[in-house]
Amino acid sequence: MKFIDTAEIHVKAGDGGVGCVSFRREKYVPKGGPDGGNGGRGGDVVLRANRHLNTLLDFHYRRIYKAERGEHGLGARKSGKSGRPIVLEVPVGTLVKEAGTDNIIADIVDDEQEVVVAKGGRGGRGNAAFATATNQAPRRYERGEPGDERDLELELKLLADVGFVGLPNSGKSTLISVISAAKPKIADYPFTTLVPNLGIVRVDIGKSFVVADIPGLIEGAHLGKGLGLQFLRHIERTRVLVFLIEASSKNPVEDYRILLNELWLYNKDLVRKPRLVALTKTDLLLRKDVDRLSKLQFPKHRTRQKPVVPCFTISAVSGDGVDTLVGAMWNELKPKRME
């Protein structure tokens, strides 16, 4: 299935039904009074979260959604039937905004959570509702109120505990395929990952967490270069970040600084998240070189050398250091799960 994480739709709630003007007309019932019923209420437009969905693809094929209008009132004080609501299912993690603005209508983060994004109009009153002691034969009625109508922007932000970030071809896809059941595309050239991938990592019985593999970042990603800007939103919800850097890089610390700077320029809150560094593909190096790299220091802050971020050397191919890294990720998550 094609991965789509943004969509624009137009929603229109149902209009309320028109109230009825009617007078009772029965044989042997002289001077029958007003008996016009009220119009029915228009249907709402509702968004409902579905944990089995992971894309907004359906909203690219159809962009206009209208709920049913309320039925008109009838004689004999019969009210019109309310219009049926229309329920649109969206993935968990969908942010709903007013189109063209930064006004957030809803942040849908729980399975089966429902949000009314357009309310149906109230039905109009029939003439029976206007009868009084001094006006016993009213011909007054109300038209139904129009339902809400608006343009919406839907933006999907994947829900994951840990986010993998790194330069292209840094081994993110290989690692997620080893520690989870995810099967991303893997190849020896940059930008093999074109969409985010999710995987569930099982640490022990009853202990698991979700990891997200984000397409490779390059310098200038916050300005839209490469694929970074398109998918950086997906690490905004993660609790822990793991920076994956090729151990064979000429300057691993500089690669780390590039990644850290791109996150800071995109959203300063991202650099406040707990962070780990993993030097990948150590199976391609000699043991003495791996030992030397394990002593590198990666600063936690952009402008200061201390404190430093925990660093691990791993090989997803041979498995060296992978279990240690998974354990460190779990330990970073544990305090947050207990809150």
Image (tube, rainbow, N blue to C red):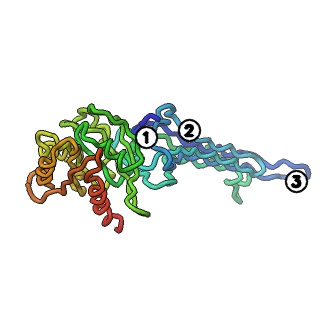
- Residue in view at x 66 percent, y 47 percent: 39
Kindly indicate the quadrant of the structure image that contains residue 68: top right
Relative placement, left or right, of 175 versus 208 is: left
- Residue in view at x 43 percent, y 53 percent: 109
Residue 319 percent location from the top left of the image: 29, 50
Looking at the image, tell me whether mark 2 or mark 3 is earlier in sequence order: 3
Q: CA distance from mark 1 to mark 2?
A: 13 Å
Mark 2 secondary-structure assignment: strand
Amino acid under label 2? Lys
Looking at the image, tell me whether mark 1 or mark 2 is earlier in sequence order: 2
Amino acid under label 1? Leu
Kindly indicate the quadrant of the structure image that contains residue 246: top left
Mark 3 nearby-residue class (10 Å; few <14, some 14–19, many ≥20) = few
| Numbered tag placed on residue 130 in the rendering | none
- Residue in view at x 38 percent, y 54 percent: 201
Relative placement, left or right, of 80 versus 323 is: right
- Label 2 belongs to which residue? 66
Q: CA distance from mark 3 to mark 1?
A: 54 Å
* C-beta proximity under 8 Å, tags 3 and 1: no
| Numbered tag placed on residue 29 in the rendering | 3
Mark 2 nearby-residue class (10 Å; few <14, some 14–19, many ≥20) = some
Rendered view: 120 above or below 323: above
Residue 175 percent location from the top left of the image: 31, 46
| Numbered tag placed on residue 152 in the rendering | 1
Quarter of the picture holding the C terminus = bottom left
Residue 107 percent location from the top left of the image: 41, 51
